[in-house]
């Protein structure tokens, strides 16, 4: 497959077994916990589902490595399993982590509570302030953690400088690429060491599987794999099958979702009931030029706030017909949520305020509906003169 460089082709063909297993065009589900082995098989070569090495795992690992341009890949039972296992593999008690300030709430809690309980220290820094990174650096600093697009304000850190900073100081650079997916951005091509995904989102894409992924340097991924084997956060074969299936349409979905998100962001930015819109396609986005230089597409998530004098947030959400009020993102259906009550509910009100996550902030994950239908739905829900409809 090395002669085919386009991601569309890799999504379909990379990692697929040759010859096909029993002639099956789709890799079958190997719903077995263990496999027959020779009496002299070394332990590391044993096939066992907890060790993430069934044929379903092998295909996924090869495909994900090809998509991100990594040496190796590993799937896990959730995005948080990928994040926590990676950080636990890289950090030990007494070590120090530098992390971008505005992170997914689950990651923030992991760093500030669970890792802290293990004696692992951290410093949060702005994604643009290189001098601040230098001040945060300690002899015990081991890694730098960031997100390609932050959740939920869609900030774009100075990712090239983060890579350079880590290379200069011998740090492992770790990036959560969930919001962009390899269709929009491939961090390893820009020098990052490890890429993480909540594969529950765009990689799976159908709101029917919970999974995570780790892709990067073979030595780091192997270290994470050993830790994962001990922690047991493996992805079951049926989950592997669902993720494998979802990946094949990733490029089609993400390009459509990104285009629609841009259309809706521009529509909302001109609407009189809207105060602020966050999406890197907008000229008002402070890192738009950087996003255009780094990303092939701007992503399918946007966030916005309503003006104080406009339709109340609760009424606006109730009036929507198409977006489902639910956490998560990246599915074929549009999902709408309030980060202060979902992804970042674990943070204190003061912490959310410091990060710019207000109680009125709304996050919209765009699905595969027609942009015109979503725009019409948003328009009617924002109309303060229209009576609420009953269902």
Image: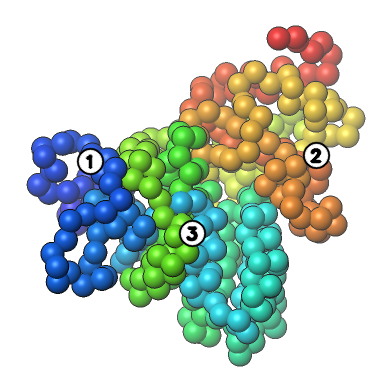
Is 47 on the left or on the right of 293, as rendered?
A: left
**Disc number placed over residue 360 in the picture, else none:** 2
Q: Quadrant of residue 354?
A: bottom right
Helix or strand or loop: what does disc 3 sit on? Answer: helix
SS at badge 1? loop
* Quarter residue 8 falls in: top left
Q: Residue at x 38, y 47 (%)?
A: 236
Relative to 304, is 147 above or below?
below
- The answer to whether any part of residue 388 appears in the image is yes
The answer for how far apart the CA atoms under marks 3 and 1 are is 24 Å
Local packing at callout 2 (Cα closer than 10 Å; few below 14, some 14-19, many 20+) is some
Quick one: which residue is furthest to the right in this view?
309
Indicate which disc residue 82 carries: 3
Residue in the image at 24% along x and 51% along y: 55
From the viewer's perspective, tell me whether residue 160 is left or right of residue 385: left
Relative height, residue 149 to residue 44 (above, below): above
Q: CA distance from mark 3 to mark 2?
A: 30 Å
Closer to the eye: label 2 or 1:
1
């Amino acid at each position: 497959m090395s002669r085919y460089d386009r991601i569309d082709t890799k999504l379909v063909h990379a990692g697929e077994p040759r010859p096909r297993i029993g002639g099956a065009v789709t890799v079958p589900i190997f719903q077995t916990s263990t496999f027959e082995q020779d009496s002299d098989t070394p332990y590391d070569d044993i096939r066992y589902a907890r060790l993430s090495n069934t044929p379903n795992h092998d295909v996924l690992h090869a495909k994900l490595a090809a998509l991100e341009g990594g040496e190796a890949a590993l799937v896990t039972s959730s995005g948080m399993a990928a994040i926590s296992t990676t950080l636990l593999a890289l950090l030990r008690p007494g070590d120090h982590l530098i992390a971008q300030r505005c992170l997914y709430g689950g990651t923030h809690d992991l760093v500030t509570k669970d890792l802290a309980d293990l004696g692992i220290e951290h410093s949060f820094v702005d994604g643009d302030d290189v001098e601040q990174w230098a001040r945060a650096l300690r002899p015990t600093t081991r890694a730098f953690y960031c997100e390609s697009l932050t959740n939920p304000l869609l900030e774009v850190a100075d990712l090239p400088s983060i890579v350079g900073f880590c290379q200069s100081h011998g740090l492992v650079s770790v990036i959560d690429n969930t919001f962009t997916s390899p269709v929009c951005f491939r961090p390893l091509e820009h020098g990052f060491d490890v890429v993480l995904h909540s594969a529950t989102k765009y990689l799976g894409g159908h709101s029917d599987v919970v999974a995570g992924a780790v892709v990067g340097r073979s030595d780091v991924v192997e270290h994470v794999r050993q830790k994962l084997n001990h922690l047991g956060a493996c992805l079951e074969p049926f989950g592997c099958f669902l993720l494998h299936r979802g990946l094949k349409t990733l490029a089609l979905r993400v390009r459509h979702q990104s285009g629609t998100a841009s259309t809706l962001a521009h529509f909302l930015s001109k609407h009189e009931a809207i105060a602020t819109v966050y999406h890197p396609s907008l000229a008002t986005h402070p890192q738009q030029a950087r996003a255009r230089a780094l990303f092939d597409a701007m992503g399918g998530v946007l966030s916005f706030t309503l003006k104080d004098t406009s339709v109340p947030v609760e009424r606006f959400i109730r009036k929507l017909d198409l977006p489902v009020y639910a956490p998560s993102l990246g599915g074929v259906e549009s999902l709408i949520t309030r980060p202060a009550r979902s992804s970042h509910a674990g943070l204190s009100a003061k912490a959310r305020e410091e990060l710019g996550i207000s109680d009125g902030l709304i996050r919209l994950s765009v699905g595969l509906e027609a942009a015109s239908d979503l725009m019409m739905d948003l328009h009617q829900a924002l109309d303060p003169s229209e009576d609420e409809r009953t269902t």
